[in-house]
Amino acid sequence: MDDDSLKKLKYDEQRKKRVKRIKRTIIIVVMALIIIPIIMCIFLAIRVKSLQEQIDFLYEARYTDIMNARYEKRVNGGTDSLEYLSEKEDEAEVKGTVEQTSNEAPDEGTEGIHKIYLTFDDGPSENTAQILDILKEYDIKATFFVVGKEGEEYEQLYKRIVDEGHTLGMHSYSHQYSSVYNSLDTFKEDFHKIQDLLYNVTGYKPMIYRFPGGSNNKVSNTDVKELIEFLKSEGVEYYDWNASNGDAASKEYTVQELINNVVTSISDDKNQSIVLMHDTNTKGKTVEALGPVIDKLKEMGLSILPIGSDTEPIHLLKTDE
Ligand SMILES: [Zn+2]
């Protein structure tokens, strides 16, 4: 082999290597161009989901803030409410019941015992068992507006709610405003999913519903009146609330404040109060406040009941306008 052909061979080899290197680089770049967007999409999807959850949470928080501001204004601004409360308590001690006094009451007076319905939204959670234990200890029946959770431990909790005499209500399956309220069809689908789940697990077909965010929410893409019509066609009644312990507010209340919030908010309505509370993993203080809240309500001579078919509903959305 002469020098020239040796050089050529060497050159060819180098060229081949170079081409190989370029090929490899191109493959890596193409792979990266495919994989990076996929990873970013996954990341964004997770991020959107968590943001949506935060929006849902903040929406409920904002609503509770408005309610609380109203109560605080009434307590601090108008002295009537506080005087009314303490008088009502004194009276309750004597009579064992609470009645309206015409001049102290902000609204028109009615007779009879003020009925209290304690309601827990968003469960089951890590706190449900403890809430049920407390209710059992106090021999109180409440109402649970639950969402859809799969798994043995949640099934046990749905069953306990029914077995221990509480009212099991629906609060949507997914509690995701974007999907529940996307259209009448998605609402129907979600409704049947939660009703079927609860029926299959407990053998009890729940017939009451609480709209996520309330019936007067401003997030629904669909006219809530249509959704109400659908519930009606299913023989289902919906219940909003007219009192709250404020546990969904962005401000985190102390246990004592949660107790006070209930007492303050129930003075709003004289016939009955449907008290909104939450059964979620982060609401430990609601659990702590529950026993004292019941003590306080009993002290006031109020009767605490689970929502039943004869319970007058509270509707926040005005449908007859
Ligand atoms: Zn909720």
Image (cartoon, grey):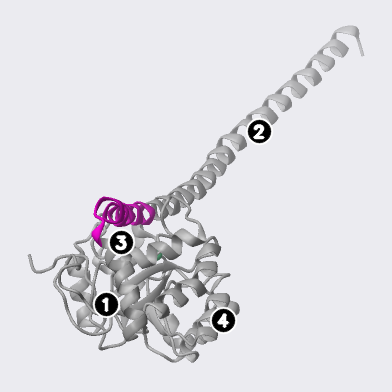
Residue at mark 4: 133
Q: Amino acid at mark 1?
A: Gln
Q: Nearer the viewer, mark 1 or mark 4?
A: 1
Residue 28 is labelled as 2
Q: Residue 101, image x and y in percent?
A: 19, 74
Q: Residue 34, image x and y in percent?
A: 56, 39
Q: Which numbered disc flags the more N-terminal residue, 4 or 3?
A: 3
Residue at mark 1: 272
Give the image quarter of residue 83.
bottom left
- Residue 143 visible to the viewer: no
Give me the C-alpha separation between circle 4 and circle 3: 32 Å
Q: Residue 38, image x and y in percent?
A: 54, 44
Give the image quarter of residue 100.
bottom left
* Residue drawn at (61%, 35%) of the image: 32
Q: Nearer the viewer, mark 4 or mark 3?
A: 3
Element at badge 1? Answer: strand
Q: Is residue 254 magenta?
A: no
Residue at the limit of the structure toward the top, as seen here: 3
* Residue drawn at (23%, 74%) of the image: 270
Ligand 1 shown in quarter: bottom left
